[in-house]
Image (cartoon, rainbow, N blue to C red):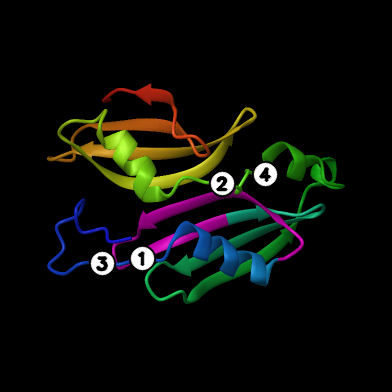
């Protein structure tokens, strides 16, 4: 994916696919599921931030979205009330048959004239896995948020400028 369409960079910025990010995370934390996956620009680079959950552990994982370099891989025990797979069952996202970030952005952009995306997040909303995309206007004064079904591309929710 090339992201220069949305940002004023001098040169194209190419990032890895969401599936590549998921594969890298799973290779490091195989006994877990993904709770959220976020693509954001931190001022220096694009990175994927992944929160994972196992039966008794929580994982924080960051990866440089251009170079595939793992920036952080930390784990900590879940609170007792969330152990034994309780949180895992409630929070894990469905990473099967995801539409790409590009597809989700294209769907969202058709509803956001004059706005550009700046943050993408894969998360669970009820029983659905959704792409939450945050947009801003050209001046950065107003933001809007869209939630798109991550499997079929249907619009789930639009929060208008605030």
Q: In this image, 22 relative to 140: left or right? A: right
Q: Residue at x 52, y 59 (%)?
A: 19
Q: Who's the residue at 38% across and 31% down the image?
A: 146
Residue occupied by mark 4: 92
Residue under label 2, please give it: 97
Mark-to-mark CA distance, 2 and 4: 15 Å
Evaluate if marks 1 and 3 touch, with contact meaning CB atoms under 8 Å apart.
yes
Along the line of sight, the residue nearer the viewer: 130 or 100:
100
Mark 2 or mark 1, whichever is nearer to me: 2
Precedes in sequence: disc 2 or disc 4: 4
Q: How far apart are marks 4 and 1 (CA)?
A: 24 Å
Query: Quadrant of the rendered structure where residue 145 is?
Result: top left
Is residue 71 in the magenta section?
no
Which of label 3 and label 2 is nearer to you? 2
User: Which comes sooner in the sequence, label 4 or label 3?
Assistant: 3
Q: Which residue is drawn at 51% across and 44% down?
A: 122
Q: What element carries label 2?
A: loop
Residue 7 is situated, as x and y percent measured from the top left of the image, at 19, 55
Q: What numbered label is drawn on residue 15?
A: 1
Region rendered in magenta? 30-50
Q: Residue at x 30, y 30 (%)?
A: 144
Residue 71 percent across, percent down from the top left: 50, 73
| Element carrying mark 4 | loop
Q: Is the magenta stretch mostly helix, strand or loop?
A: strand
Q: Earlier in the sequence, mark 2 or mark 1?
A: 1
**Residue 29, image x and y in percent?**
69, 66
Q: How far apart are marks 2 and 1 (CA)?
A: 20 Å
| Secondary structure state at the residue bearing disc 1 | loop
Horizontally, residue 162 falls left or right of residue 101, namely left
């Amino acid at each position: 994916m090339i992201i220069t369409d949305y940002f004023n960079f001098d040169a194209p910025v190419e990032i890895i696919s969401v599936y590549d990010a998921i594969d890298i995370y799973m290779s490091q934390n195989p006994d877990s599921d993904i709770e959220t996956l976020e693509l954001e620009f931190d001022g220096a680079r694009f990175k994927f931030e992944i929160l994972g959950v196992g039966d008794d552990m929580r994982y924080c994982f960051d990866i440089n979205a251009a170079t595939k370099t793992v920036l952080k891989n930390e784990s900590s025990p879940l609170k007792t009330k969330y152990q034994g797979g309780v949180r895992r069952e409630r929070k894990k996202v469905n990473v099967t048959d995801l539409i790409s970030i590009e597809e989700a952005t294209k769907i969202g952009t058709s509803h956001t004239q004059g706005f550009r995306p700046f943050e993408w997040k894969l998360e669970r909303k009820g029983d659905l896995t959704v792409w939450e995309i945050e947009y801003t206007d050209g001046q950065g004064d107003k933001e809007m948020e869209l939630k798109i079904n991550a499997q079929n591309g249907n619009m789930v929710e639009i929060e208008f400028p605030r």
